[in-house]
Image (tube, grey):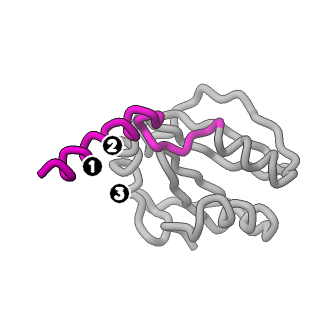
Amino acid sequence: MRIIHINVLLFLILLGCSNNTGLFDFTQLVKELEKAKVEFSIIENNEKDPFFSVPPNVIDVDGEYILIYEYPTKVDMEKDASAIHPDGNIGNASISYISAPHYFKKGNIIVQYAGKNKVILHHLEKIFGKQFAGR
């Protein structure tokens, strides 16, 4: 019984030492892109996308845009992510993308990239793993 109490106490101590969220956020994404030596710029954006509950941060990589939706919690992110169909359409909408859509998620962010740039896709897959939706 004493071992169980010690393990629970150790778990609570370790939990208290973490950031209590375990989230991957926009700042961490920027650091990962910088570490990979990807040249990009952050574009100021205040426009909300009608399909998501938060406005996206926008990153420009060689004239192609990556939209990053950052949520307060992973639960909020998963709620919006659940509306994205495997083909990249959202909810009941049939979206005409400028190019093949790719959706990635990690921590509390969803990333949308509509394009075919293999270098951009490589970096996104390296950071996020395989896309969860798109074409």
What residue lies at 46% left-to-right and 37% top-to-bottom?
18
Could you tell me which secondary element the residue under label 3 belongs to?
loop
| Residue located beneath label 2 in the image | 10
Q: Position of residue 53 (x, y in %)?
A: 41, 37
Residue type beneath disc 3? Ser
Task: Measure the alpha-carbon separation of dots 1 and 2.
Answer: 5 Å
**What count of labels does the image hold?**
3
Sequence-earlier tag: 3 or 1? 1
Q: Amino acid at mark 1?
A: Asn
- Mark 2 or mark 3: which comes first in sequence? 2
Nearest-to-viewer mark from 2 and 3: 2
Q: Can you tell which quarter of the image residue 11 is in?
A: top left
Q: Which residues are magenta?
A: 1-27
Task: Choose between 57 and 35: the one closer to the eye.
Answer: 35
The CA span between labels 2 and 3 is 35 Å
Residue at 65% from the left image edge and 59% from the top image edge: 127
> Residue 7 bears which disc, if any?
1
Q: Secondary structure at mark 1?
A: helix
Q: Magenta region, mostly helix, strand or loop?
A: helix
Q: Residues within 10 Å of mark 1 (few under 14, many from 20)?
A: few
Percent across and percent down for residue 23 are 49, 43
Distance CA(mark 3)–CA(mark 1): 35 Å
Q: Residue 35: image x %, image y %?
A: 81, 49
Q: Quadrant of the C terminus?
A: bottom right
Instruction: Evaluate if marks 3 and 1 touch, with contact meaning CB atoms under 8 Å apart.
Output: no
Which amino acid type is marked by label 2?
Answer: Leu
Q: Are marks 1 and 2 in contact (CB under 8 Å)?
A: yes
Q: In this orientation, which residue lies closer to the viewer: 52 or 108?
A: 108
Q: Is residue 97 left or right of residue 83?
A: right
The residue to which callout 3 is attached is: 82
Label at residue 44 = none
